[in-house]
Amino acid sequence: MIIFVANIPFKTRQKEFENLFSEYGTVEKAYIIYDKASRRSKGYGFVVMPNNDEAKKAMELLNGFDFNGKILVVTEATSKKQESGKEQESSS
């Protein structure tokens, strides 16, 4: 399962971010998105957890969690294709 995480403190390191989720299960990959020009964190990222039960538990416990002074927003990631489909349906 791919998890979307928003409101990540800008000074958070990749390993620190990964370690937060690994407390709840196996993390295949965790990455923070950076601006290409400034190389600064954009404040959001993704976590890939192969076990859906562990991923759901992590989402449940970390959504609203105070991480280094910021409250995380943690949800299941949706594809851009799914999102654009929803927008088209609602505008019909």
Image (cartoon, rainbow, N blue to C red):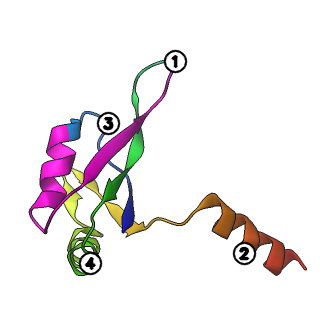
Q: Is residue 14 above or below residue 2?
A: above
Q: Quarter holding the N terminus?
A: bottom left
Residue 33 percent coordinates (x, y): 42, 39
Give 38 or 70, whichever is nearer the viewer.
38
For marks 2 and 3 on the same chain, the one whose residue lies earlier in the sequence: 3
Span of residues in magenta: 15-36
The residue located at (82%, 72%) in the rendering is 88
Let me know if residue 68 appears in the view.
no
Q: Amino acid at mark 1?
A: Ala
- Spatial CA span between label 2 and label 3: 31 Å
Residue holding disc 3: 10
Report helix, strand or loop for mark 2: helix
Residue holding disc 1: 37
Give the label, 4 or 3, closer to the camera. 4
Q: Amino acid at mark 3?
A: Phe
* Crowd rating for badge 3 (residues with CA inside 10 Å; few <14, some 14–19, many 20+): some
Residue lying farthest to the top in this orientation: 37
The residue located at (20%, 75%) in the rendering is 54
For marks 4 and 1 on the same chain, the one whose residue lies earlier in the sequence: 1
Residue 69 percent coordinates (x, y): 21, 50
Q: Amino acid at mark 4?
A: Glu
Residue holding disc 2: 86
Residue holding disc 4: 60
For marks 2 and 1 on the same chain, the one whose residue lies earlier in the sequence: 1
Give 57 or 64, whichever is nearer the viewer.
57
Report helix, strand or loop for mark 3: loop
- Spatial CA span between label 4 and label 1: 34 Å
- Spatial CA span between label 2 and label 1: 32 Å
